[in-house]
Amino acid sequence: MTDKTGRNSLTYKDAGVDIDAGEALVARIAPAARSTRRAGADADLGGFGGLFDLKAAGFKDPILVASTDGVGTKLKIAIETQKLGGIGQDLVAMCVNDLVVQGAEPLFFLDYFATGKLNVEEAAIVIEGIARACRESGCALIGGETAEMPGLYAKGDFDLAGFTVGAVERGHVLPKKNAMVEGDVVIGVASSGLHSNGFSLVRRVIADAGAVYDKPAPFDGARTLADALLAPTHLYVKSSLEAIRAGGVKGLAHITGGGITENQPRILPDGLDAEIDLGRWTPPPVFGWLARQAGIVESEMLRTFNCGLGLIAVVAAESAGHVIDAFQECGEKAMRVGLLVAADGEAKVVYKGALKL
């Protein structure tokens, strides 16, 4: 292309940004976004902002709860192996699970996809995965941003961020720290694997071990190492809302970075510790392999990974059975793993026994 003087005229595409590719992506993902429609949102894309009608969603006196997160260096494995199908669920789960533990119902989600050069097919796979996870969580995908930034990202790399807003009626916000007492039951809900935390350490262990992603996993011969590591973060929204409706739930903790050790105390009042029996569940085999392969001590495992529990609930003793039933009726594996005990000072986790690694 030339200008009026006959000189070569640069375009945005010449600089590395392809507007047509961005428009092609929007067209490709529009049906996936529409499939997430729910009361309060029509999930159409293309406006400058996404709209949501709280009244239409049935809320009367709501408090809004917001959360944002990413997938972290788990993305490096997904990009290297070109296994992108589960990364969208990782992104949604890391956000909506943080909402539901506050007692909130996720309402809508927005995503941010940033790359050096947009690959429409790859981006569509990721965003269609986001839409599937939104549907499963009852959450409308009402917008997002695709940023093409040549020179900022290495060839083939991209990054993701997610943003979600939910609502809970006033008076139903969790945790209810003032209601927690000695003897309340701690319930653990199983994880699907590593979820999306600790992957900088995981990748270091893989590199040191010389393990190969497309070979059978050393701890699971039925799957490749990549498939085992990339198992998507579990979505706890529907099961947690059912457990809350069962009654007696005083607090929920999403076990992410910091593991059980750092996340459980966040929902406890001072003067009460969570005494957890590590022998009450069996972590997925990946955790034992990581610990043995790299000599990771149990305390480090417990403050880095979920170690098999992706969600922990604090429940009134008389309601524990009903809450476990509610989780299990939603397909979860839930079990009693401990009790709240009287203590001095800031809340902490006190462990009994040893992990079955």
Image (spheres, rainbow, N blue to C red):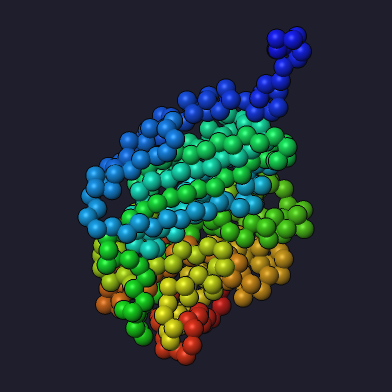
Q: Quadrant of residue 272?
A: bottom left
Q: Nearer the viewer, residue 244 or 194?
A: 244
Quadrant of the drawing holding the N terminus = top right
Q: Residue furthest front?
A: 5
Q: Is residue 349 positioned above or below 225 on the image?
A: below
Q: Nearer the viewer, residue 158 or 254?
A: 158
Q: Residue at x 48, y 75 (%)?
A: 265
Q: Quadrant of the C terminus?
A: bottom right
Q: Is residue 159 visible?
A: yes
Residue 177: x, y in percent? 36, 77
Vertical position of residue 297 compared to residue 115: above or below: below
Q: Determine which quarter of the picture holds residue 49.
A: top left
Q: Is residue 276 left or right of residue 302?
A: left
State the residue at coordinates (52%, 28%): 25
Q: Is residue 130 left or right of residue 9?
A: left
Report the residue at 69% width, 28% height from top: 16
Q: Identify whether 343 is placed above or below 147.
A: below
Residue 264 in the image, given as x and y percentages of width and height: 47, 72
Residue 271 picture location, percent across and down = 43, 86
* Image coordinates for residue 230, horizontal then vertical, percent: 58, 49
| Residue in the foreground of this view, choosing between 219 and 78 | 78
Taking the image as shown, residue 59 lies to the left or right of residue 110, namely left
Residue 135 visible here: no
Residue in view at x 62 percent, y 30 percent: 119
**How many labels were placed on the picture?**
0
